[in-house]
Amino acid sequence: IVYKFPNFVYDMSWYFIFPFIGAITGWVTNWIAVKMLFHPKEPKNFFFFKVQGVFPKRQKVMAEKLGHIVASELFSIDDVVSKMKSSDNQEVIAFVENKIDDFINVKLVASMPMLAMFLNDDLKSKIKSTLLTEITDVIPGVIDSYADKLKSEIDVKSVVYDKVVNFSSDKLEEILYSIMKKEFKFIELLGGILGFLIGLIQLIILMLE
């Protein structure tokens, strides 16, 4: 004797897998969506459409916008120049003073041994004082000149653009994935959760019918 369950019992048993089918479908769909942000890296013809990953396709646009943001909001040559011109020169003077001491006490004596006979402490002090005064007077002009040259020759926006636009597709994916890895995983997980909830709602509706 073969016992046959009523059709509604048999059918209801299948309803309970709807949430799990929805979870798998949602997770796989979002996983594919994340992958398609980077792949295919080169344009591929798909029937009448040309398909390419979002980031590789818009790499130039992204590089241009990133260059603009960095230059205008994060790092400006004008800020660097302003800082150079307004900074205290004491550190530079201290560095120059150490170099002068090394020059007088070591290099000058080594290159002209006979001069060591005449270099007493008083003479060394006068030479150092004279050199330090002359160099100190020149430092502000050198800083201004170098700062202006830096400003005219370096375009932060162009530097950032060139760097980003010349990234290989693999390098771009590596950088973005390292920054947004948690967010991408969350998107995949969220797809699974939403798919499960949709399947659960379908199950409840079918059970109430």
Image (cartoon, grey):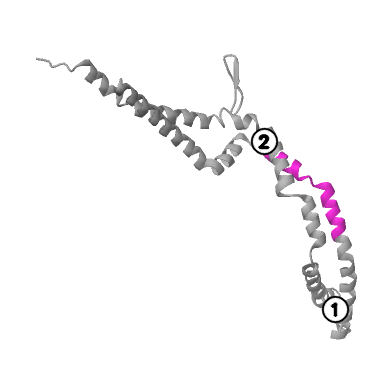
Q: Secondary structure at mark 1?
A: helix
Residue type for callout 1: Pro
User: What is the crowding at mark 2: few (fewer than 14 residues within 10 Å), some, or many (at least 20)?
Assistant: some
- Horizontal side, residue 55 vs residue 182: left or right: right
Residue lying at 81% horizontally and 78% vertically, measured from the top left: 105
Residue 206, horizontal then vertical, whole percent: 32, 21
Asked which secondary structure carries label 2, the reply is helix
Q: Quadrant of the N terminus?
A: top left
Q: Is residue 175 above or below residue 41?
A: below
| Residue in front for this viewpoint, 137 or 75 | 75
Residue range in magenta is: 143-165
Q: In which quadrant is the C terminus drawn?
A: top left
Q: For mark 1, does the 10 Å Cα neighbourhood hold few (<14), some (14 to 19), or many (20 or more) residues?
A: few
User: Does the magenta run of residues contain 109?
Assistant: no
The quadrant in which residue 106 appears is bottom right
Residue 143, relative to residue 6: is it above or below? Answer: below
Q: Nearest to the eye among marks 2 and 1: give it.
A: 2
Give the residue at x 63% y 36%.
168
Q: Which mark is residue 12?
A: none
What amino acid is labelled 2 in the image?
Answer: Met
- Examine the structure image and report whether residue 152 is included in the region drawn in magenta: yes
